[in-house]
């Protein structure tokens, strides 16, 4: 099928976003690519978010708005959006973020290639308005098609040049249905359904595992809003990296056989175990980063290199 005529479902899960939801939906509706549906699911908001969503659904037939009777948690709400989608492709748009009008026209053509699992754009962080650009993310790789192993190895080893959040990416619907996990098995009884830190990354990793390539559009077509209510801003120090480590541990236990890569992953886990209050989340040993596997070998040279780089960068920034 020529995917340039295929339906794309833009999913907007939301909760208490009355300040941002209208601008978010408007950015979805402004897509130059015409064949879209916008699925908004309100997770029992206590503010005026639902009223705003209803107003858009009344005015524009492309918007289909739904509301949960109770708050079912963030990941379950993502899946509630997915259950309503009719499109061949999925664009997840967080309700405090925005996308460029040409997002789909510039990313969708890459998925005509069955060897490419997903495509993402570079990102600009902003605060009050999209014009208030503060930082550019994922812009070190030129617009290109890249070997999926680079994403997998890069993410596992903490390379910040690759995205963890699917808010900047486009996927096939079939892959999102297969790879967006509600519960992530782990040894420390962490509730991924509730905190939603790691489910997003696993969508990328599990998809990359089944395709030889991914694509990058090095243009700022996605805009992530920085504000006090976002998970990345409000989470306690260490919570986000440690829970991403647990998600990586699940992936590594099931899909990574490269002993050298596993040692390097353990080395990074060790630095996080020592740096953050890991015990608060039930993580006390390297084995705890994996669901069942005992794997505590590290790469000493890699550890020394990481310590040196962190110390050098810290001194250089003074």
Image (cartoon, grey):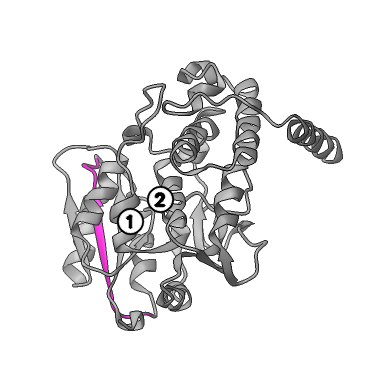
Quarter of the image where one finds residue 229? top left
* Residue furthest left in the image: 69
The reply to whether callout 1 and callout 2 are in contact (CB within 8 Å) is yes
* Residue 218 seen in render: no
Q: Nearer the viewer, residue 150 or 160?
A: 150
- The quadrant the N terminus occupies is bottom left
Q: Earlier in the sequence, mark 1 or mark 2?
A: 1
Residue 101 point in image, percent of width and height: 44, 74
Q: Is residue 196 visible?
A: yes
For disc 1, the neighbor class at 10 Å (few under 14, some 14 to 19, many from 20) is many
Residue 229, label in figure? none
> What segment is highlighted magenta in the picture?
33-45
Seen from the viewer's position, the closer of residues 116 and 176 is 116
Write the residue at 50% across / 49% down.
164
Give percent across and percent down for residue 50.
22, 51
Residue at horizontal 42 percent and vertical 28 percent from the top: 291
Q: Quadrant of the C terminus?
A: top right
- Tell whether 9 sits left or right of 20: left
| Residue located at (43% from left, 46% from top) | 202
Residue 39 lies within the magenta run: yes
The image shows a total of numbered marks equal to 2
From the viewer's perspective, is 203 left or right of 74? right
Find numbered disc 2 in the image and state the secondary structure of the residue it sits on.
Answer: helix
Any magenta on residue 86? no
Q: CA distance from mark 1 to mark 2?
A: 7 Å
Q: Is residue 87 left or right of residue 161?
A: left
> Residue beneath label 1, please?
176
Q: Residue at x 52, y 38 (%)?
A: 233
The answer to which of 130 and 170 lies nearer the viewer is 170
Q: Which residue is mark 2?
A: 203
């Amino acid at each position: 099928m020529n995917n340039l005529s295929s339906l794309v479902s833009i999913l907007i899960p939301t909760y208490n976003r009355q300040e941002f939801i209208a601008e978010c939906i408007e950015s979805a509706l402004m897509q130059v690519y015409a064949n879209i549906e916008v699925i908004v699911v309100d997770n029992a908001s206590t503010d005026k978010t639902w009223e705003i969503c209803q107003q858009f659904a009344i005015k524009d037939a492309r918007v289909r708005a739904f509301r949960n009777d109770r708050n079912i948690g963030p990941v379950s709400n993502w899946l509630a959006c997915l259950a309503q989608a009719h499109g061949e492709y999925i664009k997840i748009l967080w309700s405090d973020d925005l996308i460029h009008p040409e997002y789909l026209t510039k990313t969708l053509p890459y998925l005509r290639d069955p060897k490419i699992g997903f495509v993402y754009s570079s990102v600009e962080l902003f605060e009050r308005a999209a014009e208030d650009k503060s930082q550019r993310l994922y812009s070190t790789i030129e617009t290109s098609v890249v070997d999926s192993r680079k994403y997998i190895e890069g993410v596992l080893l903490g390379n910040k040049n690759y995205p963890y959040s699917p808010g900047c990416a486009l996927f096939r619907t079939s892959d999102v249905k297969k790879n967006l996990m509600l519960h992530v098995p782990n040894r420390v009884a962490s509730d991924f359904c509730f905190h939603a830190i790691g489910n997003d990354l696993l969508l990328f990793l599990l998809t990359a595992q089944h395709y030889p390539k991914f694509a990058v559009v090095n243009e700022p077509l996605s805009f992530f809003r920085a504000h006090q209510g976002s998970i990345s801003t409000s989470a306690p120090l260490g919570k986000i990296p440690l829970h991403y480590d647990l998600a990586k541990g699940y992936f590594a236990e099931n899909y990574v056989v490269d002993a050298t890569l596993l040692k390097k992953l353990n080395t990074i886990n060790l630095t996080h175990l020592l740096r953050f209050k890991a015990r608060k989340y039930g993580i006390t040993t390297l084995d705890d980063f994996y669901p069942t596997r005992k794997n505590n070998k590290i790469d000493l040279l890699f550890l020394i290199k990481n310590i040196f780089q962190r110390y050098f960068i810290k001194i250089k920034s003074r």
